[in-house]
Image (cartoon, rainbow, N blue to C red):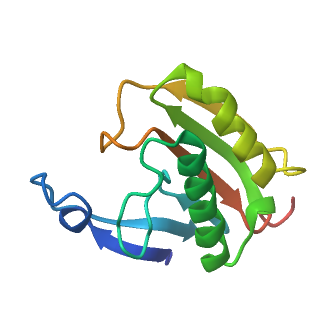
Amino acid sequence: MTTHTRIRPFNTKETYPEQNLDNDLCQAVVAGGVVYLRGQIAQDLDTRESVGIGDIEAQAEKAMANIDMLLREAGGSLEHIVKVVVYLTDIRFREPVYTVMGRWLKGVYPVSTGLVVSALARPEWLVEIDATAVLTEPSGA
């Protein structure tokens, strides 16, 4: 049986107390040398407080800082990222978000997908960044 490492498990009723949810999730799963991160937003992962409300650059910074921290907790680093997906609530946020993301990922060269969505899980969240990282290459690669 394969064992996956689950990083920072939580229940959605703690994160979204105003919603009738009861889902057991985690911030990251390491499986087969791959780190799958939950989409990161402008939230302090220890206190669950939203940060940077109304400030798209501050929200992007916090999302990237969370990604960096979670990858380190998983035994990796930003340079292990192979894919990012960026969700924006307004197309005008693309340039400031990608500028922030570009500073964090300089020289990494992941593939990237960007989407504009009508909303995220909380109205104060303006950007969500999802990342996947590979820590080890499969044998024979």
- Along the line of sight, the residue nearer the viewer: 110 or 34: 110
In the rendered image, is residue 62 in sight? yes
Q: Quadrant of the C terminus?
A: bottom right
Residue drawn at the location 12% of the way across and 54% of the way down: 18
- Look at 62% across and 76% down and name the residue there: 74
Total residue callouts: 0
Image coords of residue 86 (percent x, y) = 57, 37
Looking at the image, residue 89 sits to the left or right of residue 131; the answer is left
Q: Residue furthest right?
A: 107
Q: Nearer the viewer, residue 81 or 122?
A: 122
Residue 84 position within the rendered picture, expressed as x and y whole percent measured from the top left: 65, 43
Q: For this view, does 40 lie left or right of residue 84?
A: left
Q: Is residue 128 above or below residue 30?
A: above
Residue 109 in the image, given as x and y percentages of width and height: 84, 44
Please tell me in which quadrant of the rendered image residue 140 appears.
Answer: bottom right
Which residue is rendered at x = 47% and y = 56% of the image?
38
